[in-house]
Image (spheres, grey):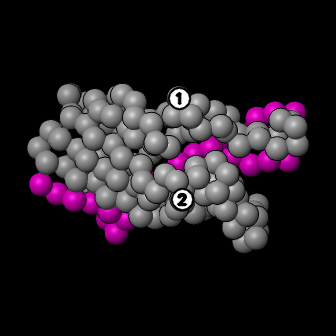
């Protein structure tokens, strides 16, 4: 059995903008700073602290744009995610429990107080094991962020990427 956390592994969330005013918005790469992934044979158990999300930077066409957001803008986005989107006081933990079957993790994700089945493909990239999943926020009762009467919003699908050492 091995356990990984932010000291030796990485968990990132990618959000994507849409809407009439999307030109003034940003795709984002967000770091999950507190999480734990335990691998015991074919079984995987992971917990994530949604209050630990930190905006790393804006993205443009999949490329980081480190100077595109000020510290103040990043802090405001993080607060909005915590308070308005994920309601972390009411839902302080995200859990994923699964079993590896070939190159797929078959399991259950508990997010925003709802549990749903989730299949996550994984692969080896260099010396890392990488799992990536697309999450449709409304499936878990999460309303994607929207502002300015819906002319500026985040797409309902976000991408989650977890990298564990090989």
Q: Is residue 139 above or below residue 50?
A: above
Residue at the image position 28 percent from the left and 41 percent from the top: 97
Locate the N terminus and report the quarter of the image it occupies. Answer: bottom left
Q: Nearer the viewer, residue 82 or 151?
A: 82
Q: Position of residue 22 (x, y in %)?
A: 82, 40
**Residue nearest the viewer, comparing 98 with 62:** 98
Residue at (20, 28) in percent of width and height = 101
CB of mark 2 within 8 Å of CB of mark 1? Answer: no
Residue at mark 2 to residue at mark 1: CA–CA distance: 20 Å
Q: Quadrant of residue 9?
A: bottom left
Which of the 4 quarters of the picture holds residue 41? top left
Q: Please check the rendered image and state whether residue 28 is part of the magenta-colored stretch, yes or no.
A: yes
**Corner quadrant of residue 146:** top right
In primary-sequence order, the first of circles 2 and 1 is 2
Count of numbered badges drawn on the protein: 2
- What residue is at 76 percent from the left and 70 percent from the top? 72
Q: Dot 1, crowdedness within 10 Å: few (<14), some or many (≥20)? A: some
- Viewer can see residue 49: yes
Q: Secondary structure at mark 2?
A: loop
Query: Which structural element holds mark 1?
Result: helix
Residue ID for mark 1: 139
Q: Which residue is mark 2?
A: 89
Residue 159 in the image: x percent, y percent? 52, 39
In the picture, measured across the screen, residue 14 lies left or right of residue 84, that is: left
Q: Report the magenta residues as a range.
A: 1-29
């Amino acid at each position: 059995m091995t356990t990984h956390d932010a000291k030796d592994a990485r968990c990132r969330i990618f959000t994507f903008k849409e809407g009439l005013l999307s030109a003034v918005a940003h795709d984002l790469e967000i770091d999950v700073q507190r999480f734990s992934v335990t691998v015991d044979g074919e079984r995987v158990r992971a917990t994530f602290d949604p209050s630990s999300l930190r905006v790393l930077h804006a993205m443009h066409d999949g490329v980081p744009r480190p100077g595109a957001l000020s510290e103040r803008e990043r802090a405001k986005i993080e607060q909005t995610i915590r308070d308005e989107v994920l309601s972390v006081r009411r839902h302080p933990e995200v859990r994923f429990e699964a079993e590896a079957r070939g190159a797929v993790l078959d399991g259950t994700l508990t997010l925003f107080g709802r549990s749903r089945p989730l299949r996550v493909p994984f692969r080896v990239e260099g010396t890392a094991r990488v799992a990536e999943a697309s999450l449709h926020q409304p499936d878990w009762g999460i309303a994607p962020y929207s502002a300015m009467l819906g002319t500026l919003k985040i797409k309902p699908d976000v991408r989650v990427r977890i990298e564990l050492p090989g």
